[in-house]
Amino acid sequence: MIRKRAGQRSFSDAILFGAHIPDPKTLLDPVLRQLDELLGSDELVDEVLEALRKRHPQSARRGRPGTPAEVALRLLALKHIRQWSFEELEWEVTGNVAYRAFCRIDSGKVPDAKTMIRINQAIDEATLRRVFERIVGEAARRKVTRGRRMRVDTTVVETGVRYPLDSGLCEDVTRVACREMERVRAAGLPVPETFRNVRRSVARRLYEIEQIGRRPTSREAKLEALKKPYKRLLRTARRVVRQARAVVEAAARLRRTIPGRVARSLRVLEQVAFHGNQVVAQTRARVLRGETKSAGKLVSIFEPHTQIIRKGKKAKPTEFGRTVKVQEAEGGIVTDIAVVDVHDSALVESSIEIHTRHFGRPPRVLAADRGFYSGVNIERAAAMGVRHVVIPKTGHRSDAVRAREGTRVFRRGRAWRAGGEARISRLKRTFGMARSRYRGDAGLVRCTYWAAIANNLVAIARAE
């Protein structure tokens, strides 16, 4: 007899549910099945354990039992391999018996999204660096890579900022400052009597600026017409910044304990006052004085470490983020990743040293694009033991250089170097390194390390 629906479940069915499903490990995909043994390494778990024990002075001995270090490591690795948000991580693991077994949760309670955010923040850059290096060492031990070849390149990891407009930056300063001063006033702390929420006034100025930008007139006429609304906007922003600084100074003179939420608002006001002065200064210089080039321009008050980077891309000529070095060996293993602030040509020697530390010997082939070229780099790489330095020369090439770049070894190394673009694309598209979803400079470093860790874990699993 075929029924439309199954009948009501009995209590015994709930008890015996586990007897009717296969072993959860057999339900995992091949990649996670291979990683199940790798992530059980005591060295990796101990690194996370030490980081979690530093959250509070007595975390190792007192308090309620928290999320085990092994569970935290597996949950974070799974999140970045699958490129889930923290909410998706909680939802997926809660409803999947295979993920529960992989994360060593089984029938226990899955940590919620907020708990995982705090755990992720507790694992600092130094811990992630050690975890990353241990995984690279494991890849070398399993002979996934032998370190015979090395390629290095740089890319831009964007931060979570909107397109920086001078009017938008002034609006951010006034909006955040007014919001925090209202919270401080509601808590009973002194606020200047002249303080008013200027949100509507700023919105009118932004509307005027937008309408002027749409006028069918010449560029010179638009720039002249923009000065009047910008002057009014800057006047408002300067007044709000002065009021924010006055609130911070008045709170510092108080002799009573300030609640935690109010103290947080005061810290935000202090940062807004500091960045607000720079926003007002660079806006006045660009709009009123016509100075389009300003060194160290601030593009976001929320991500002040963001830089304006031009890599010569036609589709995206200007990017807002930080430059990240990606170093790779054969086998798809990223051997080093770091946020850098120097020219590409200054990274060759340090990259060879890092490769030598991982594998005990320099690479036979070093491949990079022409941005890494310099005569000193070629000589230094050869002196450090690199047999074939595959870095095309910039500018005019002599007959000897043309002959060297026409050899079979150089051509094959140059073709292999092109695969580094695919590796960077995979880090960005598959493992979430295109745009940092974590806040601050430390968050961007955390994003890059987790992308490299996830890439190496998948590469090791697929090579087994």
Image: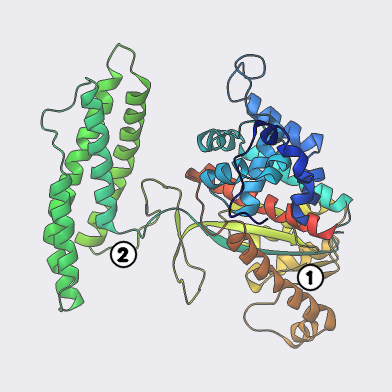
Q: What is the quadrant of residue 219 in the picture?
A: bottom left
From the top left corner, tell me how far across and down residue 440 is, in percent: 48, 44
Nearest to the observer: residue 146 or residue 294? 146
Of the 4 image quadrants, the one containing the C terminus is: bottom right
Q: Amino acid at mark 1?
A: Val
Residue 134 appears in the figure: no
Q: What is the quadrant of residue 97 in the picture?
A: top right
Q: What is the quadrant of residue 4 in the picture?
A: bottom right
Q: Indicate which disc residue 142 carries.
A: none
Total marks in image:
2
Disc 2 is placed on an element classified as: loop
The residue at the far front in this view is 1
Q: Residues within 10 Å of mark 2 (few under 14, many from 20)?
A: few
Disc 1 is placed on an element classified as: strand
Query: Residue at image x 41%, y 47%?
Result: 304
Contact (Cβ within 8 Å) of mark 2 with mark 1 = no
Query: Residue at image x 87%, y 55%?
Result: 361
Query: Residue at image x 34%, y 19%?
Result: 259
Q: Amino acid at mark 2?
A: Thr
Q: Which residue is mark 2?
A: 292
Q: Indicate which disc residue 389 carries.
A: 1
Nearest to the observer: residue 62 or residue 21? 21
Residue 11 higher or lower than 337, as above or below:
above
Residue 245 higher or lower than 220, as above or below:
above
Q: Is residue 249 left or right of residue 144?
A: left
Of the 4 image quadrants, the one containing the N terminus is: bottom right
From the top left corner, tell me how far across and down residue 257 is, in percent: 34, 13
Nearest to the observer: residue 15 or residue 76? 15
From the top left corner, tell me how far across and down residue 86 is, in percent: 54, 44
Residue 462 appears in the figure: yes
